[in-house]
Image (cartoon, rainbow, N blue to C red):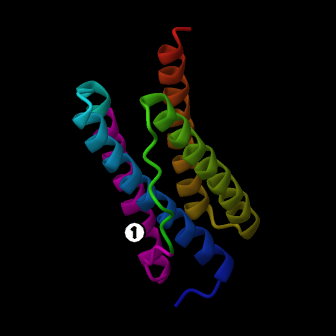
Amino acid sequence: MYTDPRLSGYLSRALSHELAAVQQYLMQAKLTGLWGLSAQSAQFRRDVNEELVHAERLMERMLILGIPCNATQLPPIRPGRTLAEMLQIDRGLEIEAIRLYEEAAFYCARRQDGETQALMRALMEDELGHLKELDQQLSELKGE
């Protein structure tokens, strides 16, 4: 069993975050589909798949380290009443993830755990890309 409770905490929080994002984006895919926004619904489905890959990568690392793959508590879904509101909510989730992965990567660097640090940095880069996409979508909605 792995004995670094702080690293276990980072990995568990990351897994919880990714599974919460899956839940959020899947609900948004269904809702935008009901609104007739098929392109946005398809984008949310792609986001679901990306977040599932993140969760799988985290689970694999946890299993390698002997850490139980338990997502702690998933936050409630926040649907949003408009597409713009959905994207703003998602933007907040992505910023939260970026901060978590940055903090975790820094901790891993101090502990000289290069493999977990590389995973956290890779996830952070993916989330930075997603944040950029969300900002672009929000700009387009505003007509900028």
Residue 139 included in the magenta stretch of the image: no
User: How many residues crowd mark 1 within 10 Å: few (<14), some (14–19), many (20+)?
Assistant: some
Q: Residue furthest front?
A: 81
What x and y, as percent, mark residue 143?
51, 9
Give amino acid for label 1.
Answer: Glu
Q: In terms of image quadrants, where is residue 38? A: top left
By secondary structure, the bulk of the magenta-drawn segment is best described as helix
Position above or below: 48 against 43: below
SS at circle 1: helix
Residue 63 included in the magenta stretch of the image: yes
Q: Residue at x 37, y 46 (%)?
A: 25
Magenta-drawn segment: 43-72
Horizontal relation, residue 21 to residue 113: left or right: left
Q: Residue at x 30, y 35 (%)?
A: 32
Instruction: In this rendered view, identify the residue nearer to me: 15 or 138.
Output: 138
Q: Residue furthest bottom?
A: 1
Q: Residue at x 46, y 37 (%)?
A: 86
Q: In terms of image quadrants, where is residue 91? A: top right
Count of all numbered marks drawn on residues in the image: 1
What x and y, as percent, mark residue 93?
56, 48
What x and y, as percent, mark residue 11?
55, 69
Horizontal relation, residue 28 to residue 85: left or right: left
Q: Residue furthest top?
A: 144
What x and y, as percent, mark residue 132?
55, 28
Instruction: In this rendered view, identify the residue nearer to me: 136 or 118.
Output: 136
Position above or below: 144 against 65: above
Q: Quadrant of the C terminus?
A: top right
The residue carrying mark 1 is 60
Position above or below: 119 against 67: above
